[in-house]
Image (cartoon, rainbow, N blue to C red):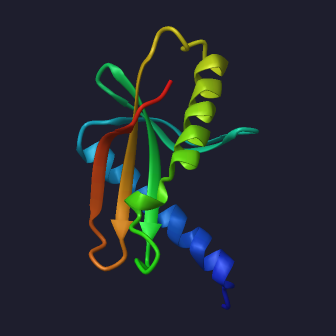
Amino acid sequence: MFFSSKDRTKLQGAQAETQAEQFLQQQGLVLQQKNFRCKAGEIDLIMRDQHYLVFVEVRLRSNRQFSSAAESVTWQKQQKIVRTAQIYLLKHNLLDKARCRFDVVTFDRLSGHPQWIKDAFGGA
């Protein structure tokens, strides 16, 4: 079966999200929702870490020629994630109730091991 480059990238991204979810669950986090989407954007994983609601961006980089996976979470991307998280909090009536954190889990194609960056940027 032939996969286009775009299909292959989507499949690899979905596999990275699944791997990140499993890794974070091994660290004691509990999945709340996968792939929350709204007009503002998408959040890959929303998890509970004790008293924190954690919004997780998963990044996979197979070619480090331009930037690392962590560096690909630009200020603009961070702002989009924060806006999306605010919508999630409003939708679930959690805006003033949840302590939030924004984490990033990256995968470098060479190692395949996750790098977990807790509290990677400020937010909601």
- Between 8 and 83, the residue placed more toward the observer is 83
Q: Residue 1, relative to residue 18: is it above or below?
A: below
Q: Residue at x 25, y 46 (%)?
A: 26
Quick check: 96 above or below 101? above
Q: Outermost residue, left direction?
A: 27
Q: Is residue 17 visible?
A: no
Rendering coords of residue 50 (x, y %): 29, 23
The image position of residue 19, as x and y in percent, is 38, 59
Q: Is residue 33 left or right of residue 26?
A: right
Work out whether residue 4 or residue 31 is closer to the camera in this orientation and state it. Answer: 4
- Residue shown at the point (57%, 71%) measured from the top left: 11
Residue at figure coordinates x 40%, y 77% from the top left: 64
Indicate left or right for 84 with 60 as reference. right
Indicate the position of residue 95 as horizontal and vertical percent values.
Answer: 55, 14
Note whether residue 62 is visible. yes
Q: Residue placed farthest to the top in the image?
A: 96
**In this rendering, would 36 be left or right of 30?**
right
Q: Quadrant of residue 68?
A: bottom left
